[in-house]
Amino acid sequence: MSIYALNLFDLADNDDYRDYSRRSPDAVGRYGGRVVALGKHIDHPAELGDTEPRQALVLVEWPDRDAFDAFLADPALADLHPLRENGTRRYVWWTYDRLDDLRPLLHR
């Protein structure tokens, strides 16, 4: 079953994330991942929540958890992940199972 990795972050004051963003599409694609959404935060009066907004959003769909875990554990990418980590601030990274509808959540 597909999973989604929701990435919310502010860019750090360096070029590390720029370097990460140049290399990551190929690395993500090697494991079947694909970016399904990119976004820049905009202020809107309807905003709610107890988490401060972040500057950027990246939503990546992975074929399954094993593919995502393999991407994270690949020793050939050991120098890639620090670029993401050092190139961002206030990073939030959450994973979600893909659902066709909300019934699994509503019928507990």
Image: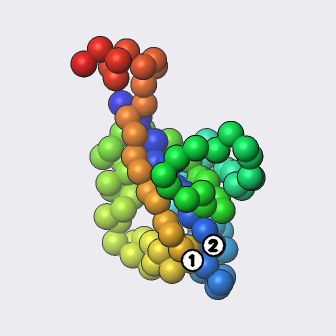
Residue 98, image x and y in percent?
A: 42, 31
Q: Quadrant of residue 9?
A: bottom right
Quarter of the picture holding the N terminus:
top left
Q: Report which residue position mark 1 lands on.
A: 87
Residue 106 image point, x, y percent = 35, 18
Q: Residue at x 74, y 52 (%)?
A: 43
Q: Position of residue 52 (x, y in %)?
A: 55, 59
Any part of residue 33 in sight: no
Q: Where is residue 63 shown, x and y percent of the image?
A: 42, 38
Q: Which residue is mark 2?
A: 11
Q: Quadrant of the C terminus?
A: top left
Q: Which comes sooner in the sequence, label 2 or label 1?
A: 2
Q: Pointer 2: residues within 10 angstroms few (<14), some, or many (20+)? A: many
Look at the picture and state if 56 lies above or below 98.
below
In the image, what residue type sits under mark 2? Leu
Residue 42 in view (yes/no): yes
SS at badge 2: strand
- Which circle marks residue 62 in the picture? none
99 shown above or below 67: above
Calculate the distance from the C-alpha at mark 2 to the C-alpha at mark 1. Answer: 6 Å
| Residue type, numbered disc 1 | Gly
Give me the residue at 52% from left, 47% from top.
Answer: 49
Q: Going 64% across and 44% down the picture, which residue do you hit?
A: 47
- Could you tell whether 97 is left or right of 26 in the image? left
Which image quadrant for residue 87? Answer: bottom right
- Quarter-wise, where is residue 57 in the image? bottom right
Closer to the camera, 1 or 48? 48
Contact flag, marks 2 and 1 (Cβ < 8 Å)? yes
Given residues 39 and 108, the one toward you in this image is 108
On the rendered structure, is 97 left or right of 33?
Answer: left
Neighbor class of circle 1 (other Cα within 10 Å; few <14, some 14-19, many 20+) is many
